[in-house]
Image: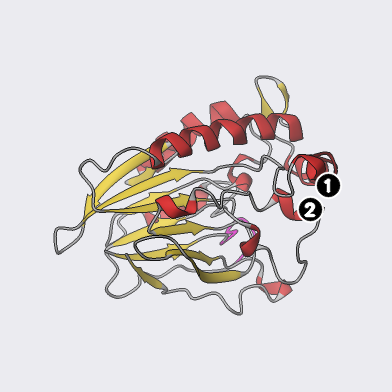
Amino acid sequence: MRLQLLSDLHLETESYEPEPAPGAELLVLAGDIDARWDALARFRGWPQPVVFVAGNHEYDGRDVDASTAALREVCAGHGITMLERDRLVVSDAEGTRIRIVGTTRWSDFDLFGVVGRAKAMRAGSYFMDLMQATQGGRPFDVEAMRAEALACRAWLEVELKRPRDGWDRTVVVTHFAPSVKSADPRYGARSGTASFCNADDDLLPFADVWLHGHLHCVHDYAVARAGGPTRVVCNSRGHERRGEAEAHQPRLVIDV
């Protein structure tokens, strides 16, 4: 299957018009498309099916739990399939069955292990203050994000370890990155990096391809595993004024 990947378009502030990639069979939106949700309407009537995993900015200033349900409805109204701890099995033109596993996968702040967690959470508080989200009437702070992240991780691990049943290949879509290998090279591996990357390296071998966003840079690397490498791809656009869009490939197509 040929997948087009877009993320971190930030259409709440960026002036950008996404275009279908020739030959793509499905469009994957890996989060932070529009904090206002309005631009999701641009994908109504897209020539290929569209799958969406929410980014952190889709929850800015909102209640996380209520917004997940509301965002599902908005996506459904535009003909978009939102995945949050969901799997979808689709077939390509040749009949190959692709399991798409999707979740935002928030940060659990364990990128540098238990010893680095407290420092990582202190660094993450800055981003949570900017986000201004809530959950059940309480601030969605680093502790709340960690709890949500661990729930995502638990679901993802169970789903990925299921015996193969009705699919030939697996694609994981998360907003947050699965490895420190996806750290933004401008900043390297520091405490704040744990707000962008998780230590899900042990789960990578269960996927053929892992797609993510969140980092405003691009990545395409392979992780060794038995039976062939796992390909990890990020095609974030980011903010043009900061030069982050220069490496973005608007019509990138990934073969699975």
- Residue located 63% across and 49% down the image: 198
Q: Which residue is mark 1?
A: 123
Amino acid type, label 2:
Gly
**Residue lying furthest top in this view?**
136
How crowded is the residue under tag 1: few (<14 C-alpha within 10 Å), some, or many (20+)? some
Q: Does 31 appear above or below 150?
A: below
Mark 2 vs mark 1, CA separation in Å: 5 Å
Q: What range is drawn magenta here?
A: 9-14
Q: Is residue 123 left or right of 158 when viewed as pictured?
A: right
- Residue located 49% across and 48% down the image: 203
Q: Does 58 appear above or below 182?
A: above
- Residue located 67% across and 39% down the image: 108
Contact (Cβ within 8 Å) of mark 2 with mark 1: yes
Say which mark, if any, is on residue 192.
2
- Locate residue 78, reporting x and y percent: 36, 46
- Residue located 30% across and 68% down the image: 24
Q: Quadrant of the N terminus?
A: bottom left
Residue 10 located within the stretch drawn in magenta = yes
Determine the image quadrant of residue 67. Answer: top right
Secondary structure state at the residue bearing disc 2: helix
Residue 83 versus residue 49: which sits nearer the camera? 83
Q: Is residue 19 left or right of 234 when viewed as pictured?
A: left
The majority secondary structure of the magenta stretch comes to loop
- Locate residue 197, reporting x and y percent: 65, 53
Amino acid type, label 1:
Ala
Q: Quadrant of the C terminus?
A: bottom left
How crowded is the residue under tag 2: few (<14 C-alpha within 10 Å), some, or many (20+)? many
- The colour mode here is secondary structure
- Locate residue 85, reporting x and y percent: 44, 36
